[in-house]
């Protein structure tokens, strides 16, 4: 089934450049907080991309408005939930996170403002991130009597190191875009007006590359990081060999020798 490029109740979808999908968290009246419907919508989008990885070559995830990327879980919706209702909702978020991490297409987070709790956890599910100068980050769950449960305790230490991550997780204190950059959480700090343009430019650059190559690189890095080095090197060769018989490999070499831009078709 082909990927359905349409808006959802809590998300806006459009293609700002060839081969690029932009997913915008669209609950600005609630600081783009994650309610049940957003979890279902995100799950549908990323399950769809997993099922149709050739639909796009890069994804940008951002938030509506100029102040907030995502404030985390919608605590107003959660007020009065029974334990069973809370856990049922969280299961949707867990499935969403797994779908994001499993997505074979590279994902760039364009963090346009505050990314707190589940918002930061979504950033951590992306392959890398650009942040506006005024962006702020925090995992505040410990201040609410809970803990991160959408990958925060696993993805954060992998991104910035265990000791720094423990301080952030155990205090719940926010930190700045500059700190996030210094610690390796974000790759680039952008002026707010330029954030999306810079993310789109990078996504378009990725989209112009051979899509089988980009998907295999992502797969090799993510899987290899869970292995010992010798096993990871063998896995890398298996990923590499997938590309040798492709049309895109022949096109890339021919284009280089003919001094022209390659036209990759994903086959």
Image (spheres, rainbow, N blue to C red):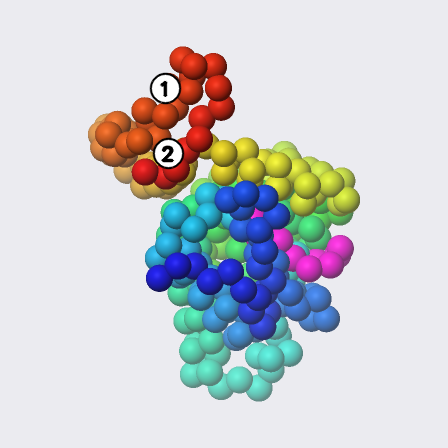
Q: Does the magenta-highlighted stretch encompass residue 266?
A: no
**At 39% across and 48% down in the image, what residue appears?**
54
- Apparent side of residue 10 relative to residue 161 in the rendered image (left or right): right
Sequence-wise, the earlier of marks 2 and 1 is 2
Q: Residues within 10 Å of mark 2 (few under 14, many from 20)?
A: some
Q: Which residues are magenta?
A: 60-68
**At 49% across and 54% down in the image, what residue appears?**
152
- Apparent side of residue 161 relative to residue 240 in the rendered image (left or right): right
**At 46% across and 62% down in the image, what residue appears?**
4
Q: Does the magenta-highlighted stretch encompass residue 64?
A: yes
Residue 154: give its label.
none
Which of discs 2 and 1 lies nearer the camera? The answer is 1
Which secondary structure lies at badge 2? helix
User: Disc 2 versus disc 1: distance between alpha carbons?
Assistant: 14 Å
The residue closer to the viewer here, 55 or 220, is 55
Q: Residue 72: where, in percent of width, then height?
A: 60, 64
Q: Is residue 26 above or below residue 54?
A: below
Residue 168 visible in rendering: no
Q: Residue 252: where, in percent of width, then height?
A: 39, 24
State if disc 1 and disc 2 touch (CB < 8 Å).
no
Snapshot quadrant of residue 68: bottom right
Which secondary structure lies at badge 1? helix
Q: How many marks?
A: 2
Residue 192 visible in rendering: yes
Q: Is residue 136 above or below residue 145?
A: above
Residue 253: give its label.
1
Q: Residues within 10 Å of mark 1 (few under 14, many from 20)?
A: few
The residue closer to the viewer here, 37 or 22, is 22
Residue 213: give its label.
2
- Apparent side of residue 22 relative to residue 224 in the rendered image (left or right): right
């Amino acid at each position: 089934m082909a990927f359905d490029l349409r808006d959802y109740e809590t998300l806006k979808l459009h293609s700002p450049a060839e081969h690029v999908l932009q997913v915008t968290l669209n609950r600005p009246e609630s600081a783009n907080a994650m309610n049940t419907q957003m979890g279902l919508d995100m799950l549908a989008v990323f399950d769809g991309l997993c099922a149709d990885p050739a639909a796009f070559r890069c994804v940008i995830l951002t938030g509506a408005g100029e102040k907030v990327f995502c404030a985390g879980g919608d605590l107003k919706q959660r007020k009065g939930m029974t334990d069973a209702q809370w856990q049922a909702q969280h299961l949707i978020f867990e499935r969403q996170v797994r779908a994001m991490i499993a997505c074979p297409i590279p994902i760039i987070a364009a963090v346009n403002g505050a990314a707190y709790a589940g918002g930061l956890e979504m950033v951590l599910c992306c392959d890398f991130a650009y942040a506006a100068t005024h962006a702020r980050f925090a995992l505040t769950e410990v201040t609410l009597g809970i803990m991160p449960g959408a990958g925060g305790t696993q993805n954060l230490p992998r991104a910035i190191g265990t000791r720094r991550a423990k301080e952030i997780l155990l205090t719940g204190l926010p930190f700045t875009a500059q700190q996030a950059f210094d610690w390796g959480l974000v790759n680039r700090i952008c002026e707010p007006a330029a954030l999306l343009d810079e993310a789109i430019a990078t996504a378009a650059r990725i989209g112009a590359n051979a899509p089988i190559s980009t998907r295999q690189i992502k797969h090799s890095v993510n899987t290899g990081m869970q292995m010992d080095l010798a096993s990871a090197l063998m896995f890398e060769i298996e990923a590499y060999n997938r590309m040798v018989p492709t049309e895109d490999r022949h096109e890339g070499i021919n284009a280089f020798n003919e001094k022209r831009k390659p036209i990759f078709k994903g086959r």
